[in-house]
Image (cartoon, coloured by chain):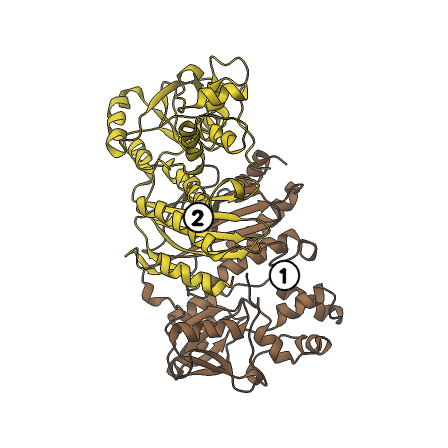
Chain colours: A yellow, B brown
Amino acid sequence: MRELELIQDLDALLAGLAPRVVIGVGDDAAVVRTGGAYAVTSVDTMLDGVHFRCGQLSWAEIGHRALAGALSDLAAMGAGGGEIYLALGLPEGTVRSDCVELIGAAQDLAIRNGMTIAGGDITRAPALSVSFTVIGYVDDPGCLAGRAGARPGDLVGVTGPLGGPAAGLAVLEGRVRLPERVAEALRRSYARPEPRLAAGRALAEAGATAMIDLSDGLATDAGHIGRASRVCLELSLSRLPLADGLEAAAGQLGRPPAELAAIGGEDYELCACVPPSARAVLEAAVASADPSVRMTWIGRVIQGSPGASFQDAARRLEGYEHVL
Amino acid sequence: MRELELIQDLDALLAGLAPRVVIGVGDDAAVVRTGGAYAVTSVDTMLDGVHFRCGQLSWAEIGHRALAGALSDLAAMGAGGGEIYLALGLPEGTVRSDCVELIGAAQDLAIRNGMTIAGGDITRAPALSVSFTVIGYVDDPGCLAGRAGARPGDLVGVTGPLGGPAAGLAVLEGRVRLPERVAEALRRSYARPEPRLAAGRALAEAGATAMIDLSDGLATDAGHIGRASRVCLELSLSRLPLADGLEAAAGQLGRPPAELAAIGGEDYELCACVPPSARAVLEAAVASADPSVRMTWIGRVIQGSPGASFQDAARRLEGYEHVL
C-alpha cells in the first residue's frame, strides 16, 4: 500500500462534511473555525496487544472503539462538538480496505455526534496504533464538570449498566460460554461502546459537581474523583446496575457479578456527583437528552479519606492498572 | 514505573505555565481559552525504528525532534501559538527519568515558541512512540499560506541550508567520518531541528502564496505544492543552499552534495512561493522575525506539468517514501 493512494481514499471519505472546516486533510495543518471561546481537548490511544487484540475485533470495531474511548473523555467534561484528529500507526502489510473500514467506522461515530475528522497522520508502526485527539468547544468553562468539584452530601450516579465489556472480553477470549444472543450483546458492549456525549452535557448543565468516564473501572475512576475533590465516594456494590448476562458470565469466571462491575473497566459510562436537590431535574434532563440512558444512584459523597470505597465489599477493590 | 508517579512528575513539570489553561494535565480533558476564531491543527508521530533509533539520540533529543516536526507543520501554514497535546507510547522497562527528559525538552521548545503542553495520554507500547497534536490560532484564515496558492511567475525560496540532517544521520550511522566540530554540527541539525515558526508567520503575512515544510525532502515537498497549486516549481540544484560539511559528507557517500540537499529530507526548513514584487518586503520581514534565517531563492513557478523539477538535474530526483 502506498501512502498517496490511502490519502486519496481518505480525502474522498472525509470530504465535504463540515462547513466549519476551511482546510481539511491534505495540507500541512487543518484550519477550522472554532465553535466557542474555550477548547476542551483530550487524547486517547489504543494499541494492538495492549488495549485490544486485532484478531478479536473487526477493523471497523477497532476504529469505533478507539474513538469512543476518546470521546468518552469529552462526555465526562460535559463537552462535545468540534473536531477529531487521528494518528494512525499501521503494521507492515496492512491492507488499504481495512484502513478505510477503520476510519469509516470512526467517521460514522463522529457524524452521529456532530463532530468532524479534520486531519491526522499515518505512519508505519510495529503494531496497529490508533490515537485520537478530540476537541469540543464551550463559551463558558463554568458549565463543564471536572473531577475536583464533588462535595459531601452529593449523590453518586452512573449512566448505565456496568461489567458488560469485561464479560464481553471474556466471551471473546473463550473464558465463558453463554447463549448466542447474550454472548453477542456482551461482545458488542465491549466492541462498540457508545460515548455518553448527550448525557454528559445534560449532566454538566443540570448541575453535576464532578464527573468522570469509566475506563479503568468504577473502583479506580471513582477514586480519581475522590482524590481530586478531597472527599470519599462511599459506594454500594449491591446498588450497581449490572449488564444483562453479567451474572451468568461472572458465575463461570468464579467472581461475584458486582465485583466484576466495579473493577471490570472499559464501560465508558459516566460516573457523576450531584447535589440531592438537583436529582429530579437532572434525571429529566438526561432522559430528554438521551432516552437510552437511565441514571442509577450507587452511593454518596462523604468527608473522609480521599478516594472511593464500597461499604458492602468483603475486600478492598481496585481496578486494573491500565498502563505501564 | 507506575503511571501515577510519572503523572505526578509531569504535573510538576507542566504546572503553572499558561494563563490560558483553565484545566490542564490530570482531568478527563484539558480546557483552554482559544486564541482566535480559527484553529490551525496538525498531528505528527515519530516512532523508534521508523523515524529515529533510540540508541542514536538522547531522550531529550527524541522529544525535541518529534515536537519540532509537528510545529514545523504549523510554521508552514504561517500559524503559531496555542497548545500541544502528547500521545506517548512507552516500551516495557522505560525509566521515569528518561520520560521526564523527553517531555522536558519538548516543554523547553514549546515555551521558546510561546506554546503550552496542555495534556496528553501515556500508554505502554511495543516501541517508543511520540505523537504530538499542535494547535495554533488565527483570527483571519486569509493570512495563512496553504499549499494550493502558488502562481506562475512566483519565486521559490527556502529558509535555510539543506542536507544537514541527512548528512548528520550518515554521521550517526558511521557511514561518514568528519572532523569532530563539523560532524557534531551535522548531527545536531538532525537531532535538534528548529521549527521556523517566526519566519513562517512573517512569510505568510508578507504575502507568500504557498508554503510547505521540508520533511520528506525538497524534491518531494516542492512537488506537493506544485500538484496542489496545479503549477510546476522549476528549481535549480546549483542554487540550493548547502549545509556546512555537506560537501565532504556527500563526497564520502559518493553522491553530488546538491542531490543530497534535494532529497535528503528532515530539514524542517520552509519552502515558500512568493510574488517577485513582494520579495524585498518579505526578506526584510523574515530577517526581522528571526535574524538566524536568510531566504535563498532556488527557482520559480511556471505553467507546466503539476509538480516540481530541477532544470539542471542529470536524472529525475525523488525523495524517499516517508511511510508505508
Residue lying at 47% horizontally and 57% vertically, measured from the top left: A96
* Image spot of residue B115 (x, y percent): 47, 53
* Image spot of residue A71 (x, y percent): 39, 41
Residue lying at 27% horizontally and 25% vertically, measured from the top left: A283
Residue for badge 2: A133
Question: Mark 1: which amino acid?
Answer: Ala
Residue A41 shows in this picture = yes
* Image spot of residue B77 (x, y percent): 42, 65
Q: Chain of mark 2?
A: A
The single residue placed furthest to the front in the displayed view is A180
Residue A148 shows in this picture = no
Using the numbered discs, state the Cα–Cα distance from disc 2 to disc 1 in whole angstroms.
26 Å
Question: Mark 2: which amino acid?
Answer: Thr
Residue lying at 70% horizontally and 54% vertically, measured from the top left: B55
- Under circle 1, the secondary element is helix
Residue A197, by quadrant, is top left
**Mark on residue B191?**
1
Question: Which one is in front in this view, the residue at disc 2 or the one at disc 1?
Answer: 2
Placement of A206 over or under B123, stated as above or below:
above
Residue A8 shown left or right of residue B107 in the figure: left
Residue lying at 71% horizontally and 67% vertically, measured from the top left: B171
Q: Using the image as rendered, state which of residue B17 and residue B89 is in the foreground.
A: B89
Residue A18, by quadrant, is bottom left
